[in-house]
Amino acid sequence: PAQTVSSQTPNKDANGKQNSIQKEAQLDGSELIAQTQLLKPLKAGDNSSHQAAAVRNTGLHKVLSLDATHSPRDAHALGQFGQPVFLASSEDAEVKKRWNEGHFNVYISEQIPVDRAVPDTRPQTCGQNMVHDDLPSTSVIFCFVDEVWSTLLRSVHSVLNRSPPHLLKEIILVDDFSTRDNLKKPLDDYMSQFPKVRIIRLKERQGLIRARLAGAAVAKGEVLTFLDSHIECNVGWLEPLLERIYLDRKKVPCPVIEVISDKDMSYMLVDNFQRGIFKWPLVFGWSPLPEEYIKKNNMSISDPIRCPVMAGGLFSIDKNYFFELGAYDPGLDVWGGENMEISFKIWMCGGEIEIIPCSRVGHIFRGQNPYKFPKDRQKTVERNLARVAEVWLDEYKDLFYGHGYHHLLDRKVIDIGNLTEQIELRKRLKCKSFKWYLDNVYPDMKAPLVKAEGLVFSRGLRKCLSLQKSSLSFEKCDLSKQTQHFNYTWMRHIRQQELCIAPQSKGRGFALVRCDNTRPELRWFHKSSNSALAEHLIAEFVSQHMCLEAEPQGDSLRLNPCEPTNPFQKWQFTHYNAQ
Ligand code: LR7
Ligand code: MN
């Protein structure tokens, strides 16, 4: 297809942003006809898009930067073009009053058009990119519980207004048992003007994970696109996502998530080259690609970014592939952890997660969840994460539990549910190990399996601990002797192979027992740099502050009340791993 002149002379709108609609208008005649066909609204059940695809065959066209809100009816409306809304201080009380309905500025949101324009924040080159004519269609799935009316509508409008109609099969709204019954009829009525919008109502609260599954189960599109219910899709957001799936059905593309301010509702840019990562204990975060990586791969700001973990809420995935992967673990409750699950699953079982800088979606980041959790929030998330750890982390699950989640190992208190199916699934899909994932997908993570290792040196004796013929003694330190090598693990065990040093309840002497992560009585607390007892090994579950102590005669060990200055209670491993 002919290139447009506008690639050399981009049009700018009042905000200095590239004017994508005018750019489209400069296409040559044949493309214009093609585009008019594409713009023709589809009636429900209309399959002309498939016919069109058949005729069009596998050509390429420039990303359709369609934006029905480009020339908004009311250019002076509040928040128009993604501008911040400033209020008089006399309105503060009203803002405050409405805040908790959504944990953002609901009062302002209500005054902004539901179909406002937003600045086209894509890198300059995105509008010139070519995509295939026969991209797969998508079902867009929003699940929500007690979402604020104005943001829910704005989310839907942004999809309707900025998605090529032939690629948007439907929008499925999954109402996860919202409590405000009086909003149901108005929502039905409102959405009835859009034949593509379907509403599904769950009969009880399922949480976002099972709500998404309910949406996916009835979706008719070839691709599933999940979005949070307080977002605004930007110009040209959809095609770059679908193009990646077209190229490889195992790619799972995510848009760049931009920020809609919770305070003034302005649409804000985010830094380039960001990707999703996790830190222990499976906490999601953003982190820039390492500088060397960008250089080495000669990356531009519009290139797809390999993403170790997705944020969770916004992505497209080939529908059949989603189900081949076993979708989400349906045992995950309400909120949290599902982004880790699907991310590990995708990478370890042969797929890829990417952030696509030419696709951008704004999201309101809220300080708190505005809905109630059926059970305690913290407990819900922890339990979900423990399921993910048990199924996907292999030996690295110790790092997860070791970062403050020891209590989750007590299965008498915390029932994480049955995992047989999930473990079977992983086997059936022949997924790779978590170590493979760390080495290949997230190599800069650096996740040492143990906290400290090597010789255990006694400061008082100036000798090292040795385990011979099932008994502990001291010897002259010698790195070449395996009998002197111990690990201090994330589970806070002092172990040599399968044997752990266990303090005896009577206070004197030690038992050597088979290590068992679920036994808290085997744990030793060692190293907290800001403590006077940093170098001590404190038996955690014996009684308060009992420390491992070397007998000054040098032939045995005992447990004594901790003394900050006693050198016979001070221990040092050869090597401490950073983390
Ligand atoms: O019980 C519920 N039922 C629901 O239908 C709880 C929530 N929901 C809906 C809710 O109305 C919303 O539309 O699910 C969606 C996500 O819930 P949010 O907006 O409260 O979640 P969040 O934005 O705080 O959290 C992020 O992490 C979640 C972990 O489970 C989900 O994966 C969210 O989709 C995800 N959001 C994003 O990725 C957007 C970017 C945030 C970041 C980083
Ligand atoms: Mn959200």
Image (cartoon, rainbow, N blue to C red):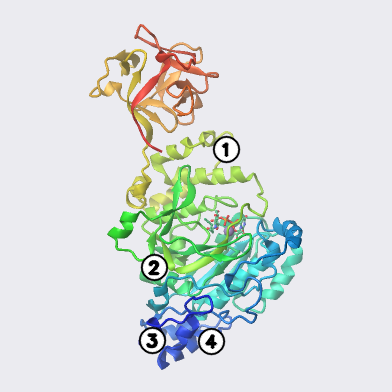
Residue in the image at 43% along x and 37% along y? 398
Secondary element under disc 4, as helix, strand or loop, is loop
Q: Is residue 472 above or below residue 104?
A: above
Secondary element under disc 2, as helix, strand or loop, is loop
| Quarter occupied by the N terminus | bottom left
Q: Nearer the viewer, mark 3 or mark 2?
A: 3
Residue 377 is left or right of residue 186, and the answer is left
The mark found on residue 414 in the picture is 1
Mark 3–mark 2 distance (CA, rounded to whole Å): 21 Å
- Where does label 2 land, which residue? 302
| Quarter occupied by the C terminus | top left
Q: Are marks 4 and 3 in contact (CB under 8 Å)?
A: no
* Kind of residue indicated by mark 3: Val
Secondary element under disc 3, as helix, strand or loop, is helix
Looking at the image, tell me whether mark 2 or mark 1 is earlier in sequence order. Answer: 2
Q: Is residue 536 above or below residue 90?
A: above
Q: Nearer the viewer, mark 2 or mark 4?
A: 2
* Residue 248 can be seen, yes or no: yes
